[in-house]
Image (cartoon, rainbow, N blue to C red):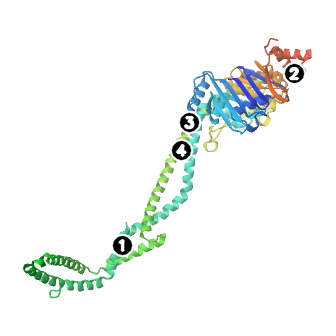
């Protein structure tokens, strides 16, 4: 619950401290006194205000709002402490202090328990600590989404909703991945077709390196010039091996002469001429052997044709795919193989994701089945409660909840497959129709408060703030709203700004908001009314008359009916 609210230099408020009770707290006052500024200060504190730059009181440099919440020891205590632990903020106390400041430059700072915090954490805490309903928020039951949310709140479906929301996100992620892969499917098909041709043509060449092309060209040149080669080899062989004039024959004679010289001329021996002659002989013998090997080559026309065809095919493939040379062809061949591999992996990935999607869909449907069961049971009970509550007004309304279960493809959402419609008829004999079509403002107020009563009777919803939700309403509807708010406050703290005496008279604590002018400056102030002051304020709210005996008597009578001693 909200224990204290501190407002400093905010709009027309200089400095205020508001203390709230545990149950129903009423704020009343003349129009323009500043009641809504108090609500705006709470919105500002939790980062929901849009007019940050205009909130600082004239002449001041900084505004700040802070509040103290009693978080008790229940579920809210555990959740809040878990959030604070994640942020490294001290925990353990049954109270939490939240503060926000803003300077003239528009720069804001947030604090939790006097430690710096960010807006995201503050927003998380606000979802647990406080709910604010404005003048038009009684229409929150108009949308099917709001109706479903209320039914789930009543049914206690939070855990199941968390599970199905997670599955919804996972299914969306899988679908996004599949859509990306499907977008590539046509391109992948083309790539696979083209690459299969490249691979087929490249494999027919039986070439694995640039050297293979060089070898083909070398062998082809040799075969095409086989006769000329043989002619040259024959002439060369004659020079080396001729028995009368060949180089080897002359080298042998030279070696013999050098051997004789070395015997008779020691100086000649030191010059190593004989050794050099021997080495020359060995070299010429190697040349002779190579020439003999070349002379054994025969013309092979079949091989020649094979090589010519292979070279022609190589050139054809290069031209076909725009490769400038064998290097580019080999690189293209490898790229084609890689892309085929990747394309096959894509097909495998699609199959894998489709299987995963089916698994997640089954999980989703199983949880949705549990949601449907809970919603069906809760809808009957909730309809009975609301009908019974509305019957106290002396009418016999019909309130029902229609649940339409959609198929997965049509109704798949983060809240399941159900479409909820609240049906209502205030007139006996009339078929109930969607609440959004037929309910008046007063009827919406009654139904919405019945909903809040039903939901909050099951749990503590923290602090509920109502900002003139009774606007444009009076009479017995006003009495109903007051009683409903009082009933809600048995389980959750309620703070209500109201202009209706019927509502104000239900409060356990009544705060009066007013303005005063001092030294040419306007100040918004607040007073915690005692019972005597409260009688006067209720009289003002009833008729604007705070002095006549009739008006004051009427005020006392209303308060007595609400259980107050006056």
| N-terminal label among 4 and 3 | 4
Is 165 situated above or below 294? above
Is 319 situated above or below 444? below
- Label 4 sits on a secondary structure element that is helix
| N-terminal label among 1 and 4 | 1
Write the residue at 43% across / 74% down.
Answer: 315
Q: Residues within 10 Å of mark 2 (few under 14, many from 20)?
A: many
Q: Residues within 10 Å of mark 3 (few under 14, many from 20)?
A: few
Q: Nearer the viewer, residue 468 or 449?
A: 468
Foreground mark, 3 or 1, reads: 1
Please give the residue where the numbered disc 3 appears in the rendered image: 366
Pointers 3 and 1 in contact (CB under 8 A)? Answer: no
x then y, percent, for residue 363: 54, 38
Residue at far left of view: 264
Q: Is residue 413 visible?
A: yes
Tell whether 153 sits left or right of 325.
right
Foreground mark, 1 or 4, reads: 1
State the image quarter where residue 86 is shown.
top right
Q: Which dot marks residue 192?
A: none
- CA gap between label 4 and label 2 equals 65 Å
Foreground mark, 2 or 3, reads: 2
State the image quarter where residue 287 is shown.
bottom left
| N-terminal label among 2 and 3 | 3
Please give the residue where the numbered disc 4 appears in the rendered image: 357
Q: Nearer the viewer, residue 469 or 277?
A: 277
Please give the residue where the numbered disc 2 appears in the rendered image: 540
The N terminus: image quadrant: top right
- CA gap between label 2 and label 3 equals 58 Å
Residue at far front of view: 267
């Amino acid at each position: 619950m909200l224990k204290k609210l501190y407002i400093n230099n905010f709009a027309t408020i200089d400095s205020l401290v508001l203390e709230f009770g545990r149950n129903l707290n009423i704020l009343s006052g003349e129009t323009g006194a500043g009641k809504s500024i108090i609500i705006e200060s709470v919105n500002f504190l939790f980062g929901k205000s849009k007019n940050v730059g205009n909130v600082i009181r004239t002449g001041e440099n900084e505004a700040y709002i802070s509040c103290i919440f009693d978080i008790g020891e229940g579920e809210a205590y555990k959740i809040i402490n878990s959030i604070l632990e994640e942020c490294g903020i001290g925990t353990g106390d049954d109270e939490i202090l939240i503060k926000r400041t803003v300077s003239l430059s528009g720069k804001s700072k947030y604090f939790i328990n006097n430690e710096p915090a960010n807006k995201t954490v503050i927003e998380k805490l606000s979802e647990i600590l406080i709910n604010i309903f404005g003048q038009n928020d009684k229409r929150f039951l108009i949308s099917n989404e709001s109706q479903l949310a209320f039914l789930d709140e009543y049914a206690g479906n939070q855990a199941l909703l968390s599970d199905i929301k997670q599955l919804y996100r996972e299914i969306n992620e899988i679908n996004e991945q599949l859509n990306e892969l499907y977008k590539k499917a046509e391109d992948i098909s083309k790539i696979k077709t083209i690459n299969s041709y490249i691979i087929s043509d490249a494999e027919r060449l039986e070439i694995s390196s640039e050297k293979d092309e060089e070898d083909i060209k070398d062998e082809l040149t040799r075969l095409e010039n086989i006769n000329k080669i043989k002619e040259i080899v024959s002439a060369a062989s004659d020079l080396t091996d001729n028995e009368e004039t060949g180089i080897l024959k002359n080298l042998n004679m030279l070696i013999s002469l050098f051997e004789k010289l070395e015997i008779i001329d020691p100086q000649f021996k030191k010059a190593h001429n004989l050794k050099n002659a021997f080495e020359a002989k060995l070299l010429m013998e190697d040349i002779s052997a190579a020439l003999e090997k070349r002379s054994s080559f025969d013309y092979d026309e079949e091989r020649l044709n094979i090589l010519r065809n292979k070279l022609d095919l190589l050139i054809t493939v290069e031209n076909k795919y725009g490769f400038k040379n064998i290097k580019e062809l080999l690189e293209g061949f490898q790229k084609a193989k890689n892309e085929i591999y990747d394309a096959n992996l894509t097909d495998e990935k699609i199959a894998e994701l489709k299987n995963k999607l089916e698994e997640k869909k089954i999980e989703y449907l199983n949880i949705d089945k549990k949601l449907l069961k809970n919603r069906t049971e809760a809808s009957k009970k909730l309809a009975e409660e609301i009908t019974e509550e509305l019957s106290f007004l002396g009418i016999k309304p019909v309130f029902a909840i229609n649940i339409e279960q959609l198929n997965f493809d049509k109704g798949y959402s983060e809240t399941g497959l159900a479409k909820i419609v609240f049906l209502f008829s205030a007139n006996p004999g009339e078929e109930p129709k969607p609440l959004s079509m037929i309910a008046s403002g007063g009827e919406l107020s009654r139904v919405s408060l019945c909903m809040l009563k039903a939901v909050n009777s099951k749990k503590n919803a923290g602090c509920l703030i109502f900002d003139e939700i009774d606007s444009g309403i009076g009479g017995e509807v006003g009495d109903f709203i007051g009683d409903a708010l009082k009933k809600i406050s048995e389980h959750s703290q309620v703070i209500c700004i109201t202009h209706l005496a019927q509502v104000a008279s239900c409060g356990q604590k009544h705060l009066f908001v007013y303005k005063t002018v001092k030294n040419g400056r306007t100040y918004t102030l607040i007073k915690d009314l005692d019972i005597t002051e409260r009688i006067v304020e209720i009289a003002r709210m009833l008729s604007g008359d705070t002095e006549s005996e009739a008006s004051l008597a009427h005020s006392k009578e209303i308060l007595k009916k609400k259980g107050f001693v006056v």
